[in-house]
Amino acid sequence: MVGQIATILVAQFALGVELPIPAMAFVVLCLVGLNIFDHFRLWLQPAVTKTEIFFELLLDVGALTVQLYLSGGAANPFISLYLLQVILGAVLLETWATWTLVAVTSACFVFLTAVNVELAVPHQHEMNFLNLHIQGMFICFVLAAILLVFFVTRINRNLVARDTGLAALRQQSAEEELVVRMGLLASGAAHELGTPLTTVSVILNDWQRMPELQANPEICEDIEEMQGQVLRCKEILSKILASSGEARGESAAPTTVVRFFDGMVAEWQANRMPPAVSYANEFAPDHAIASDIVLKQSLVNVLDNAADASPHWVGITVRRDQDDMVLIVDDRGPGFPEVMLAVVGKPYQTTKTGPGSGLGLFLLANVVRKLGGSVAARNRAEGGASVMVRLPIARLSVEPIRVG
């Protein structure tokens, strides 16, 4: 539209060509109205079909045809602007639509050779008309070149953004497939381990009732410790089966943010027994949520990673940031290599050795992403690493708690 207005003004006032300004201005106003409608439609529904693009280009061809009809028809040097719609159609549309545009623009060209409003050229002699025509062709060339660069560059940028989005979706799909495979493997292992654990439990119960073993306090203490460890293994297997959806009659228990993190940290300390933990739960006001077993286990993996990297101290902070709950886990270990910071949440990225390493943050990132949250990692200025988990409260919310 800006190009049309500029061209009309140059032809009218710089080249001295008399043009039907009111009629041509009405066409430009129609295009303004069409663009306003398009922007409103995009605001309501961002997705655009190729059929819509095709009809938009036909409307542009119609507007250009009217403008050329009012300004000399096929003799107007701007007749070559029809190629702009054809080129855009070839880039954006299917083959049939592009050839339809070729046929329509060709028909319009033929129509304008016979029907048009003759241009009022200042001096009607051949040489002057040719000079004006060449000047018009130059303006048309510059305008078409600018528009083509503008539109094609935008189209290429959109295509690159689309390809980047598709690559990200493919990567996410591959990662989720890996999570599914790991879940099936864990579920199968849990089923397989259930039988030998039950056998060990039965044998320990038999030993506990044997008189010759009951007479030895040290052996009785060892048997009780072994029974406790077997019970803990059964609880872990139950959690694995529950997280894979195989436990029946169990659902996410209602709790609050404060109780969820307090219980998780207390349980982790009891099992892991780290020498020094700095825990601060600053979340306020409290909020009712559903206790998610998978999320809890994923967060415990982060605590384990911090304890592995920094056996003598782990810092845990829970706070509220508007509508998000934030967990920050700090350690005083060697920190993350710079190459790892750029790929946090990708599988098998770790500073540890051994099978299964590098899956803790990957599993956490997948669980948190499904809940609409995010995971970020950095190296602390005073040494060590820091992992921040941000989760929207609404995704785990049960009902608000009235505080005060």
Image: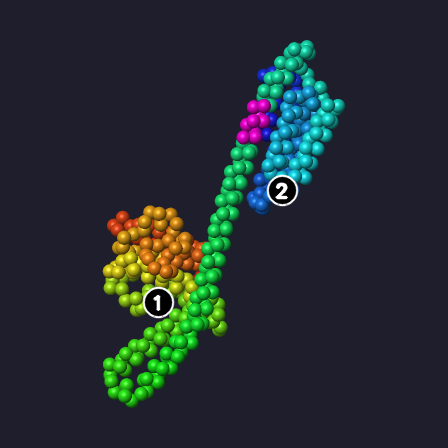
Amino acid type indicated by mark 2 = Lys
Horizontally, residue 139 falls left or right of residue 239, namely right
User: At 56% from the left edge and 33% from the top edge, which residue is drawn?
Assistant: 151
Amino acid type indicated by mark 1 = Gly
| Quarter the C terminus occupies | bottom left
User: At 39% from the left edge and 55% from the top edge, which residue is drawn?
Assistant: 348
The residue beneath circle 2 is: 50
User: At 35% from the left edge and 51% from the top edge, which residue is drawn?
Assistant: 377
Whether the magenta-drawn stretch holds residue 160 is answered as no
Q: How is the image coloured?
A: rainbow
Tell which residue pokes out farthest to the bottom in this image: 211
Rendering quarter of residue 100: top right
Whether the magenta-drawn stretch holds residue 142 is answered as yes
The x and y percentages for residue 91 are 59, 36
The residue beneath circle 1 is: 263
Tell which residue pokes out farthest to the right in this image: 114
Q: Is residue 206 above or below residue 88?
A: below
Horizontally, residue 227 falls left or right of residue 152, namely left
Q: CA distance from mark 2 to mark 1?
A: 55 Å
Q: Residues within 10 Å of mark 2 (few under 14, many from 20)?
A: few
The x and y percentages for residue 64 are 66, 29
Secondary structure state at the residue bearing disc 2: helix
Q: Is residue 198 above or below residue 123?
A: below
Along the viewing direction, whichever of 33 and 368 lies nearer the viewer = 368
User: At 58% from the left edge and 16% from the top edge, which residue is drawn?
Assistant: 14
